[in-house]
Image (cartoon, rainbow, N blue to C red):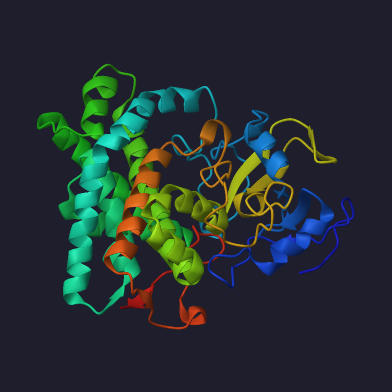
Amino acid sequence: MTETDLRTGSPALDFPQDRTCPFQPPQEYTELREHGPLAKVRLFDGRPAWLVQGHAEGRALLADQRLSSDWGHPVFPVVVQRTEGRGGLAFPLIGVDDPEHARQRRMLIPSFGVKRMAAVRPMIQRDVDRLLDAMLEKGPTADLVSGFALPVPSLAICALLDVPYSDHDFFEERSRDFVGAKTSAEADAAFGQLYAYLHGLIQRKQAEPGDGLLDELIAVQLAEGALDLDELTMITLVLLVAGHETTVNAIALGALTLLQHPEQLEMLQRDPGMISQVVEELLRFTSVSDFMVRMAKEDIEVGGQTIKAGDAVLVSITLMNHDEASYEDPYTFDVRRNARHHVGFGHGIHQCLGQNLARAELEIALGSLFARIPGLKLAVPLDEVPIKAGHDAQGPIELPVTW
């Protein structure tokens, strides 16, 4: 919609919009560029919000503690209608501010460090090889989402937490129901089932400990009173859902992007050592986590605009990663680009805790996929690949491939 906002002169676009191309921002977003690094958009309930699209401005705001991530605040912005009735429920790590956020994050940082992630790489490689063996045996067609992109991160986060992978169908389905629900009733039902499962699992582990991250938290943080059972259950729920939901999309969308850019894929196949650089460009170009939601606690001057206390702020990861002031020809996928300063994992205190794990999964999954199946191609035209709605993590719902 193009109704004009009188304060900024920019169109009050309904937000979010759906992508038409799986790996490119909606055309409506790119048209906002002419209004500068910030523009006004409108949420489903009519509430106006600032859409931050400048790379420098977005990084500054994501590091600014005058912006709140407190989902429990009674007027925190609601972007997806299904979450409208969930006021007061603040999710650990992602939906709280400091000092609560810092306390929770400190407990987990050692478990997601570079050394530990290096130690899990052989396990990820074994799982990827096994999944590719199964694909090739069943071939020559497959759904790359259900057959590959989904189980890779699920196996990894289950192993890291020591959650039984035998239960993966249950928590994968409930996770999809939770993040992709059409109504608040559906989301609440899925959340309740996930919570009950993890609450029971923690209690069983108290009686029969394992050797995963969850067991470490039980033995130290829970036993010493730094966490109670409810908070530990919620932290585990966030780690389990976030630990596979975005990476599933990143693997699938990364594979699709490479298939649609054969000359770039050929560079990787000629030089497999490029995989880290390729993954960083994919994270920039595809921007699976499309935006981050914040609320201003104080007035903030940025990008020639004044964000007022109480204003809704949507920091667009996609548009920041396509800012011409930071990237030459940003709408072109170029694996030779140095894209390390992208914000695909966010920025500031809430930067993704599991980014080292996600990088390992992406590098191993995509590097192995195109090494083992060099003739991989889409089994349907690009415009027939079903993709997720604008309010979800971006990626294909299914990805039919053949070889």
Give the answer, above or below, for where 4 lies relative to 402. above
Q: Residue at x 41, y 52 (%)?
A: 275
Residue furthest to the front: 270
Left or right of 23: which side holds 207? left
Q: Name the quadrant of the C terminus.
A: bottom left
Q: Residue furthest left?
A: 208
- The image quarter containing residue 11 is bottom right
* Image location (x, y in percent) of residue 382: 49, 78
Residue 58 position (above or below residue 100):
below
Q: Is residue 185 visible?
A: no
Residue 336 in sight in this render: yes
Q: Position of residue 240 (x, y in %)?
A: 33, 45
As rendered, which of 156 and 18 lies closer to the eye? 156
Is 243 positioned to the left or the right of 387 in the image?
left
Question: Residue at position x 27%, y 65% from top?
Answer: 372
Residue at 54% x, 40% y is 71
- Residue farthest top in this picture: 224
Identify the residue at image location x=69%, y=46%. 326
In the rendered image, which quarter contains the N terminus? bottom right
Give coordinates of residue 245: x percent, y percent: 39, 54
Given residues 56 and 220, the one toward you in this image is: 56
Q: Position of residue 6 (x, y in %)?
A: 90, 55
